[in-house]
Image (cartoon, rainbow, N blue to C red):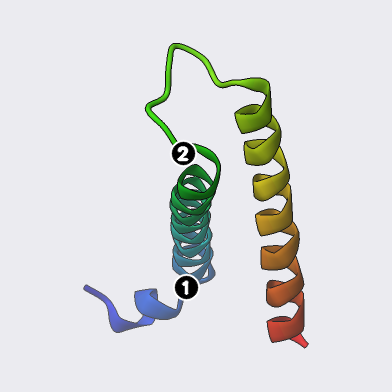
Amino acid sequence: MDPSALNSPELQNFLNQEKQKAMVTEMIGKLTSTCWDKCITGTPGSKFSSSESSCLTYCAQRYMDMSLLIMKRLQQ
């Protein structure tokens, strides 16, 4: 492999995209685990109860808000 290819803009762009995909996947996994453990207390049925659904919605929103806040702070 040509050593100069390691510094190509195309490779750097690809690596950045893959890093972002990995971060999104990790965030979704953490969000799912955290909110599931918090909101689903019993054995789930064929659909969520209204309280479970509301809890999951609010939990996911808070998680995303905090994640964005943390990312913005780290970028500063």
Residues 61 and 54: in front is 54
* Residue 60 located left or right of residue 27: right
Q: For the residues marked 2 and 1, what is the alpha-carbon distance in whole angstroms? A: 50 Å
Numbered disc 1: secondary structure: loop
Residue at the extreme front of the image, as rendered? 42
Numbered disc 2: secondary structure: loop
- Going from the N terminus, do you reach mark 2 or mark 1 first? 1
Coordinates of residue 54 in the picture (x, y in percent):
71, 33
Q: Eyeballing the image, is 17 above or below 6?
A: above
* Residue 65 located left or right of residue 46: right
**Could you tell me how many numbered marks the image carries?**
2
Residues 27 and 43: in front is 43
Q: Look at 69% across and 84% down and name the residue there.
A: 74
Residue at the extreme bottom of the image, as rendered? 76
Label 2 Cα neighbours within 10 Å, binned few <14 / some 14-19 / many ≥20: few
Name the residue type under label 1.
Answer: Ser
Residue at the extreme top of the image, as rendered? 46
Label 1 Cα neighbours within 10 Å, binned few <14 / some 14-19 / many ≥20: few
Q: Look at 44% across and 11% down and name the residue there.
A: 46
Name the residue type under label 2.
Answer: Thr
Residues 1 and 35: in front is 35
- Circle 2 residue: 41
Q: Eyeballing the image, is 60 above or below 26?
A: above
Q: Eyeballing the image, is 39 above or below 23?
A: above
- Circle 1 residue: 8
Coordinates of residue 75 in the picture (x, y in percent):
72, 83
Q: Looking at the image, do the residues carrying marks 2 and 1 touch, with CB atoms under 8 Å apart? A: no
Q: Eyeballing the image, is 34 above or below 47?
A: below
Residues 14 and 3: in front is 14
* Residue 13 located left or right of residue 76: left
Coordinates of residue 45 in the picture (x, y in percent):
43, 16
Quarter of the figure that contains the N terminus: bottom left
